[in-house]
Structures are given as structure tokens and as C-alpha cells.
Amino acid sequence: MQRRISTGLCLYADRKAAEAERDFTRAIALDPTLYDAYSNRGVVRDINHEYAKAVSDFNESLRIQPSFAIAYNDRDWSNGSKPILSAPSMISPAQSAKIPDIRMRM
């Protein structure tokens, strides 16, 4: 499953968005708890102007891992908000372990 995410990241870097989305979707099918696969697929969908699908992926990523800061940022970009960080970005499983733990405040 992590291999699918890594393959998807490589495909995305090679500007093969459709293939990257396919690999992220396959990773999710194998393990629906892979929050980083949802987030990365959301980035691909955002790039393809499929904003509702992208937001749905970011929301699912956050449902699984509420402290995943990158998904908050990327969801805000897809919604047209002005988030803290830059435009949506891919993240590897190794990188996701280094993201600071944040919580949304109501």
C-alpha cells in the first residue's frame, strides 16, 4: 500500500496525474485508513479542477487523521480560501510523520 503511494508520488512528479490518481485510489482500496493517500489524491483532483472531489478527499483524510495539518491547508485551497501554507502539495508517508500535530479549534 505504501508502495502504491510512493508510485503515485513518482507519477505525479512525472506529470502523469491520471496514473497517479489511479495508484492513490488503488492504495485506498487496499487500505481505506491511508489518510496520506486520500490527501495526495485530493491534490491531483484539485490540479484537475475537480474541487468537490478534492475537498471530499481532504475531508476523509482529516476524518482518519484529524491532526494532519497539510490536509487542512489543501482543503482550504480547494475551497478558495487563503490558507496559511502554499498551494496544495504532495506528501510522502515519511514526511507525514514529521508534520506537527495541530487541532482545529471551534
Image (cartoon, rainbow, N blue to C red):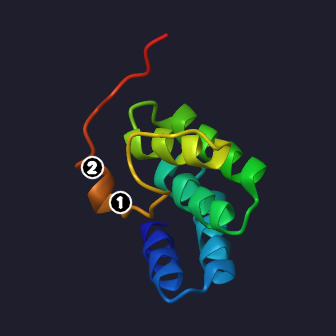
Q: Nearer the viewer, residue 73 or 7?
A: 73
| Residue 10 place in picture, x, y as percent | 45, 83
| Residue 14 place in picture, x, y as percent | 50, 89
Q: Is residue 93 left or right of residue 27?
A: left
Q: Which residue reaches farthest top?
A: 106
Label 2 element class: loop
Kindly identify which numbered label has been placed on residue 97. Answer: 2
C-alpha distance separating marks 2 and 1: 7 Å
Kindly identify which numbered label has been placed on residue 37. Answer: none
Which quarter of the figure has residue 63? top right
Q: Residue at x 58, y 39 (%)?
A: 81
Q: From the viewer's perspective, is residue 14 above or below residue 1?
A: below
Q: Nearer the viewer, residue 93 or 86?
A: 86
Q: Residue at x 67, y 74 (%)?
A: 22
Q: Nearer the viewer, residue 34 or 49?
A: 49
Label 1 element class: helix
Q: Residue at x 71, y 69 (%)?
A: 48
| Residue 92 place in picture, x, y as percent | 37, 64
Q: Is residue 21 left or right of residue 89?
A: right
Amino acid type shown at disc 1: Pro
Q: Residue at x 49, y 66 (%)?
A: 1
Q: From the viewer's perspective, is residue 55 above or below residue 103?
A: below
Total tally of numbered discs in the picture: 2
> Label 1 crowding class (10 Å Cα cut-off): few <14, some 14-19, many 20+?
some
Kindly identify which numbered label has been placed on residue 93. Answer: 1
Q: Nearer the viewer, residue 84 or 41?
A: 84
Q: Are marks 2 and 1 in contact (CB under 8 Å)?
A: yes
Amino acid type shown at disc 2: Ala
> Label 2 crowding class (10 Å Cα cut-off): few <14, some 14-19, many 20+?
few
